[in-house]
Amino acid sequence: MSMDEPVSARLADVALPVPLPRALSYLVPEKLGESVTPGRRVLCTLGSRRVVGVVVGVREGEPPPAAKPLLEVLDGISLPNDLVVFLQRLASYYLAPIGEVVRLALPPADREAERAVEELTLFSNAKGIAPRKVQWVTATDAVETSLKEKASHILAFVRAHGSLPVSRLEEQFGAARATVKKLVERGLLTMSEREAQRDPFFAETIAQDSPPEPTEPQRAAMLAIERALEATVESEKESDKGPDSKRAGSTFLLHGVTGSGKTEVYLRAIATAKKLGKGTIMLVPEIALTPQLVNRFRARFGDEVAVLHSALTARERFDMWKRLSAGEVDVAIGARSALFAPIRNLGLVIVDEEHDSSFKQEEGVRYHARDMSILRAHMHGGVCVLGSATPSLETEQLARSGKAQKLALPDRARAQEMPKVSIVDLRNIGAGPTGDRKLSILLHRAIEETLAKKEQSILFLNRRGFAPSVRCESCGELSSCPQCTVALTFHKKYGRATEADEIGPNGIMRCHWCDYEAKVPPRCPKCSSDRVALEGLGTEKLEATLAEAFPTARIARLDRDVASGKDVEKILARVRSREVDILVGTQMVTKGHDLPHVTLVGVINADAALSIPDFRASERAFQLLVQVAGRAGRGDSPGRVLVQTYNPEHHAIQFAVRHDVHGFIDRELRDRRELMYPPFSRMALARIDSLDEGEAQNAAAELAKAAREVARTGELGSLDVLGPAVAPIAKVRNRFRFRVMLRSASRERLRLGALAMHGAIARLPRTVRVAIDVDPVGLL
């Protein structure tokens, strides 16, 4: 071999848990050989540290200068190859560090262990992850006719479920261990030990259900999805291409009014996928992931459903990950991050409430789970179903452009009428007995009538706290956060607030951006006046006002201040069991909850969402109004909705009142096309912040300059560079914020501009922070 010829070596590209823009290349020692494959965890060196990384590629090539060898291939957790390919594509599209993207797909124990490790920890024995053994029973085929009643019931229950933990039988039948032991001795049951599954929904006693007779629109939707799934299997038979090949996939928009039975369509689609040997991922907004929803799926599919969400402990998440990875479970249901479940033989991805903004991650890796669901399904030649009563304009445009097939469920599944929606013009309608115009006389009467009929009401107000602001009535000074350019919200911490004690020792002002807290000053810090007053209405004050207006009514509140995780379901369970007459809440009450005894919905202030400086403000306001209105009249009694507003002519309110989703979308798409906003263009937003205002402004100017250099060259279409500009909220946590927005109808042109800004980051001071958000959802 000539001395000038490049030396070829076996190299592994490794994603490391550090914010590097790409994977690092390591030499593969001969002793590790074929054990180094994509998805395997490896021990390697980074500087003077030992770190755990994940192999994302193996190749032959010239080693980079000073390339280091891999130290060891770790047993246990590994990512499937198709998931590794998906993660690489996601990282490339969102310009995200591959190591941070790979971390999204690792089970929680692994995320802790990656940080490193002079002594390796076996993840199954890591702190908080140690397995616990439990006894399970499985029915045999043996026949026994002379059983006592209890034994007969237990045997029938086990046969209905296949296998069950003995603890589940104890909960269902009381003292069951002695009877189970006798059934095992007779050969009717077998007993084995398994690792305990710590899924918090697992212990629920769920009777298996029978699928209801579908409506004609449901039947048509089910048939279309079933045919697409069958086509997936047929295409596999004709091709042996891998998951990274460009096999055709199918995308459906399931547009169904609230209460139209979209969930039943999902259930039938999953059943078809299971019959064909395909796995399913179903994404729902975090707040909609309740035991009520999960139980519907468990009632249909038993315990072969993994539930993934933020309330799980590290042990519970680890259990779910292992069951999915081992193929024990082929259905994963969860919030945004369930997109990365290591499901085997994936064939179906469902995104319920696809319009929901929570599917976009706003920190770290800023991916959109809806868009990446389409990619993940299509990489397998599979099917992606996007469901909503109020489709996002992006998804609607996919259907109109022929990239998705639209399936319509135009009526409620049980033939109930849609609720009657009426506008309450607050410019002309006076206050009720409380004296507050936000609780108008019309809404007050409607609540009285609903209480008299022993039915339930929901009052929607998308403002947490007692009062949104505190202001001096003498000089107008607003109490603002010293660290952020936002007003402080007053919260009443203890007891029921009254006019006499609104500003007292139990109250506190809080910033919803940085959590700064302060007591309400007895005098204005600017003019020393004692006329310091609360302004506006939040859910906390609304709850207190209702308690005074309707003293015998049972009132509950649902917002982030009183409920999170498993507490949400406790409140909703009280509503379903009719222990609550009036439910007050923020947008948490709009998320698909089925509350059959709610017949009245009152929207306290429909204008709040319209005042946000964002081109999507009208779309979000419309979606919120339609979704919250859909909570009314889902049972046997008709529903009605009162929408209070100072702006009744606004098109979002007018279309929502008429339940006219198509009319709103037509109007909004026309406006977006004229202004070249998404979905007719794509955007990338650079957010720049620093403790020094001038430094942040200069950094933003550098990024804009880099993007404009790209805009002046090339033939891939125009690229608009908007900014630099001060962010709508100019300061958060004492860091001054600027932004630069890129917009283009060409995805490739936008990418080049974003890459130019990304490259300019290295030239900025290290005290400046920059985040580039591709396809941003929030612009604040």
Image (tube, rainbow, N blue to C red):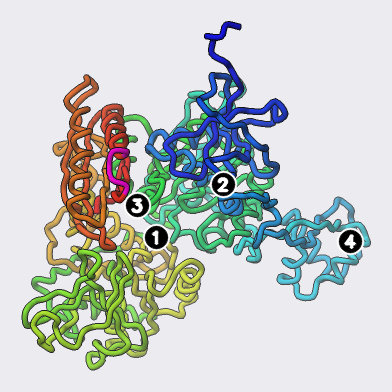
Q: Tell me where residue 387 appears, x and y as whole percent.
A: 41, 46
Q: Secondary structure at mark 1?
A: loop
| Residue behind mark 2 | 106
| Label 3 vs 2, first from the N-terminus | 2
**What element does badge 2 sit on?**
loop
**Could you tell me which residue is drawn at 53 percent across and 13 percent down?**
6
- Residue type at numbered disc 2: Leu
> Mark 4 belongs to which amino acid?
Val
In the picture of the structure, the residue carrying the numbered disc 4 is 184
Q: CA distance from mark 1 to mark 2?
A: 28 Å
* Nearest to N terminus: mark 2 or mark 4: 2
Residue 607 vs residue 582: left or right? left
Q: Position of residue 513 (x, y in %)?
A: 30, 64
Q: In the drawing, what numbered circle is on residue 357?
A: 3
Q: Amino acid at mark 3?
A: Ser
Chief SS of the magenta region: loop
Q: Is residue 764 magenta?
A: yes
Q: Nearer the viewer, residue 219 or 20?
A: 20
